[in-house]
Image (cartoon, helix red, strand yellow):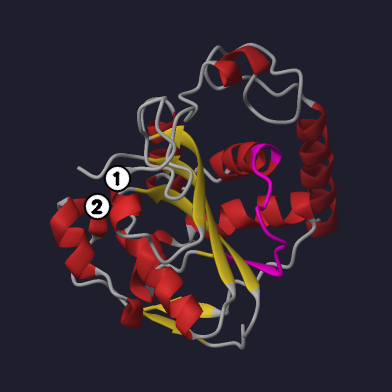
Amino acid sequence: MVNKWLKIVQHWATLCHLLPCYCLLCLKPSQRDIALCQSCERQLPWLTTACVRCALPIAFNERECGECLRSPPPFDLIQALFDYVWPVKEFIADLKYQHQLHFAKLLGRLMAQTFTPRTPVDCIIPMPLAKMRQQQRGFNQTIELARVIAKYHQLPLHVNYCFREGNKKAQSSLSARQRKHNVTANLFTVKQPIQGKHILVIEDVVTTGATASAFTRALKQAGAATVEIWACCRTGKN
């Protein structure tokens, strides 16, 4: 009886893979294996003018933001796909808080197809999530994004190289100034040797850059040669 039901489930699962994929925004067939048609993809809030170092949205006639010019960040650069607004903001919220992991496939694919590493990459490390928060959520969204990117670019993915202690408070609940004091390099522990390696870090959203900077410092203190960060979204430092 168990084998009979197992075969039925497997049969319907196979059929589901053959069904057309529909666009999340216009609800029409997407004509590809992600839930977004090309027309709606073009209308997403793509980040077109950004600082070449930290990806902060800036005026179209600028190359580098004032803060990076005054005080260069520890990471080598950030590449970000979108401004943190509708509908991508809702995609990420549904991924993180509603366990809708199909958004990781969608967003991870867009990141992988759009970005090219600026330097040769030795491995991908997803931005660590505090152990308690990951247990509460049941997964780390940056790992899910990184799986898609690593497969697409055929790069080694290391999900257990680095760990993160819990922040005093959730970053999302703090102002820009408070975020900088809430996260420091000593919150991160690098468990595996990365001496001389070129690291690609995957993040979902970069806001002030405080977490990205702190994690980069931890990686470079452990010997990383370069740290490049790919983020799905970048927002202003409000």
Type of amino acid at the residue the image marks with label 1: Gly
Circle 2 packing at 10 Å, graded few (<14), some (14-19), many (20+), is few
Cα separation between marks 2 and 1? 24 Å
Q: Is residue 141 above or below residue 20?
A: below
Mark 2 in CB contact with mark 1 (< 8 angstroms):
no
SS under mark 2: helix
Q: Is residue 216 magenta?
A: no
Type of amino acid at the residue the image marks with label 2: Ser
Q: Is residue 199 above or below residue 147?
A: below
Q: Quadrant of residue 214?
A: bottom left
Q: Which residue is mark 1?
A: 66
User: Is any part of residue 26 visible from this angle?
Assistant: yes
| Residue at 25% in and 58% down | 171
Q: Quadrant of residue 31?
A: top right
| Residue at 49% in and 77% down | 219
Image disc number at residue 172: 2
Image disc number at residue 187: none
- Nearest the camera: 9 or 193? 193
The spot of residue 236 in percent (x, y) is 29, 39
The spot of residue 88 in percent (x, y) is 44, 31
The spot of residue 141 in percent (x, y) is 49, 55
The spot of residue 112 in percent (x, y) is 67, 44
* Relative side of 209 to 81, left or right: left
Q: What residue span does the magenta drawing correspond to? A: 113-125
Q: Is residue 131 above or below residue 106?
A: below
Q: Could you tell me which quadrant the C terminus lies in?
A: top left
- Nearest the camera: 138 or 31? 31
Number of labels in the image equals 2
Q: Quadrant of residue 147?
A: bottom right
| Residue at 75% in and 21% down | 20
First-in-chain label (2 vs 1): 1
